[in-house]
Amino acid sequence: MKAPHVLQDALHQLLGDARLVAQTLPGTDLRLWLIDAANMDRCFSPEETRLILEEPPYWCFCWASGLALARWLAERPEWVRGKRVLDFGAGSGVAAIAAAKAGALEVVACDLDPLAIESCRANAELNGVELSYSTDFFAEADRFDLIIVADVLYDRANLPLLDHFLSRGREALVADSRVKDFQHPLYRRLGMLEACTWPDLAEPAEFRHVSLYHARRD
């Protein structure tokens, strides 16, 4: 099985020898097109480093919070079964795909990055599920039962988004391993999950601890 050429070409532009391979995520039955771990075992040139920093290929990794949220939904399908769900900042689409497999009525994968949308499409096909797609969260109607969010709070400047999630959905589930101390009157922490980014980037141990927050609109 060959990786989608649009994604493979985009990755080649960043890292000439890199390739995408279909990988089964640990602790799940989900498969994603992700960067081959072997491509990470070398030093990057200054030009490659510059390109990666300017246009990070978030979509070719499954980040820890996304993996943790996907596992959580698989274990608790009642959170999404029969519901309309939007995955904000979908990236690879891992959480959206998990929601669809758990029986959601509709799942919209939403991301500003066109390559992320392509990644979501390719990964949905790989897992035999159907998703809808959006590049503008604020153009969506307030019609969703649940907004799911993973790995979006890596920058504290994104914290104001917490107020906006409930403008399009009745409830929100937010998984994050970076900002562990935010206080928001509508969000309560459901628990701490364990996961690592895949392929494993050998991130600090603290980033393997994923907090899961829930909010409900009155």
Image (tube, rainbow, N blue to C red):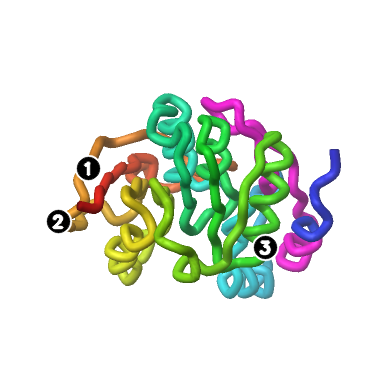
Name which of mark 3 and mark 2 comes first in the sequence. 3
The magenta region covers 9-35
Residue 67 horizontal side relative to residue 59, left or right: left
x and y, in percent, of residue 163 in the image: 27, 64
> Of the numbered discs in the image, which one, if any, rests on residue 115?
3
Tell me which residue sits at (25%, 35%) in the image.
191
Seen from the viewer's position, the closer of residues 56 and 80 is 80
Tell me which residue sits at (31%, 58%) in the image.
166
> Of the numbered discs in the image, which one, if any, rests on residue 92?
none
> Of the numbered discs in the image, which one, if any, rests on residue 185?
2
Name the residue type under label 1. Answer: Arg
How far is disc 3 from disc 2 in space, using C-alphas? Answer: 35 Å
x and y, in percent, of residue 71 in the image: 46, 31
**Residue corresponding to mark 1:** 189
Residue 42 horizontal side relative to residue 159, left or right: right
Mark 3 crowdedness (10 Å alpha carbons): few <14, some 14-19, many ≥20? some
Name the element at disc 1.
strand
Seen from the viewer's position, the closer of residues 103 and 30 is 103
Name the residue type under label 2. Answer: Pro
